Image (cartoon, rainbow, N blue to C red):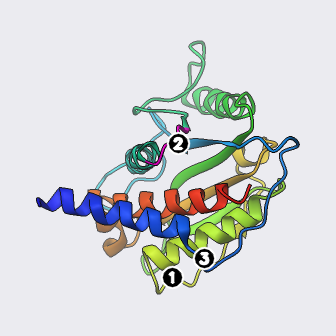
Amino acid sequence: MGQWALLWVLVLATACYLALWPGQVVPTVANGNGTRPTLVLDAGHGGEDGGAVSLTGVPESTINLAIVERMDLLLGLCGRTPVVLRQSDVSLHDPDADTLREKKASDLKNRVMAVEDTEHGVLLSIHQNMFTNAKYHGAQVFFASTDGSQEWAVHTQEALRQAVDPDNERQAKPIPDTVYLMNHISCPAILVECGFLSNPEEEEKLRSESYQLQLAAALAGAWLQYEKNL
């Protein structure tokens, strides 16, 4: 078996393990009629808005999209069809937006609209962290104020710890009120900062396809576990 074939087997095994993981009971979230939710995958930033830039010059938007693409593929192999807000390096702004500021504002409003227009939508937004001190590392999950978001975030944070980084002691936290997307939707929503682009060791991992796959498997598995309790 080739290296990549073996890696895919290990990644799928991780996702399946987390989906069946009995270590935590995930509280249910009522959606009014028992209909299974639709996962919306948001790769943060895109186009002219690359987000944070890694130590080696890679824009956050590229890494965000790579992880979302792998999540989409893994979930597809598990029989799920998530809604993916962007599938290439583009901004989702209206054509009449001219300046970068206008494009960012339009992009965020259109993402909100897309999430809100998704019937029984549930949002997972992928981002990368950055800080002035290079010592900080580790994925962290933030949750919206909507019903069910905190439980999903806590579960996802633990899944990331178990599957990707056992030494990560970070805890899920409420999203700051400055994050437009997460504060203008009405559905359950989490935002995952997958790691710090300002930490040399973690930045190298975040740029690697194998680590992106590991993150995607952990996030997909956590969602499948959470979903089956809805």
Nearest the viewer among 201 and 189 is: 189
Residue position for label 3: 22
Instruction: Tell me if 61 is positioned left or right of 140 in this view.
Output: left
Q: Residue at x 67, y 29 (%)?
A: 114
The reply to whether residue 137 is in sight is no
Residue position for label 1: 168
How far is mark 2 from mark 3, CA to CA? Answer: 21 Å
Does the residue at mark 2 contact the one at mark 3 (Cβ under 8 Å)?
no
Residues rendered magenta in the picture: 78-82
- Determine whether the residue tagged by mark 2 lies in a helix, strand or loop: loop
Q: Of callouts 1 and 3, which one flags the residue occurring earlier in the amino acid sequence?
A: 3
Within-10-Å neighbours for mark 3: few <14, some 14–19, many 20+? few
Residue 221 location (% of width, % of height): 51, 61
Is residue 199 positioned above or below 97 on the image? below
Residue 101 location (% of width, % of height): 60, 32
Residue 1 location (% of width, % of height): 11, 61
